[in-house]
């Protein structure tokens, strides 16, 4: 099994996801990490 660095994973995500999808994923991560509620679930539809 080949080891993929986080840089490669990020590069692939940036190529295939839209700005809205990247924003939604990052805000979900932030909310989970810090216990906040940045966006209403209906704001972005992925």
Image (tube, grey):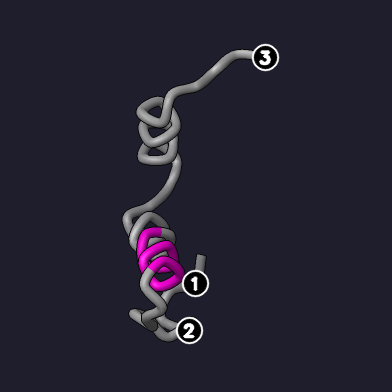
| Residue 36 painted magenta | no
Label 1 with label 2: CB-CB less than 8 Å: yes
Sort mark 3 into few (<14), some (14-19) or many (20+) by Cα contacts within 10 Å.
Answer: few
Residue visible at 35% across and 28% down? 7
Label 1 sits on residue: 45
Q: How many marks?
A: 3
Residue visible at 43% across and 24% down? 5
Earlier residue among tags 1 and 3: 3
Label 3 with label 2: CB-CB less than 8 Å: no
Secondary structure mainly formed by the magenta segment: helix
Q: Is residue 3 above or below residue 44?
A: above
Label 3 sits on residue: 1
Sort mark 1 into few (<14), some (14-19) or many (20+) by Cα contacts within 10 Å.
Answer: few
Nearer to the camera, 43 or 39: 39
The Cα atoms of the two marked residues, 1 and 3, are separated by 34 Å
- Give the secondary structure at mark 2: loop
Task: Give residue 20's position: percent from left, percent from top.
Answer: 36, 62
Q: Is residue 15 above or below residue 21?
A: above
- Give the secondary structure at mark 1: loop
Residue visible at 43% across and 74% down? 44
Q: Which residues are magenta?
A: 26-33
Q: Quadrant of residue 16?
A: top left
Classify the position of the N terminus by image quarter: top right
Label 2 sits on residue: 42
Eye-nearest disc, 1 or 3: 3
């Amino acid at each position: 099994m080949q080891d993929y660095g986080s840089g490669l994973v990020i590069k692939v995500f940036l190529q295939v996801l839209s700005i809205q999808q990247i924003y939604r994923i990052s805000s979900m991560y932030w909310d989970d990490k810090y216990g906040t509620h940045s966006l209403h679930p209906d704001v972005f539809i992925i």
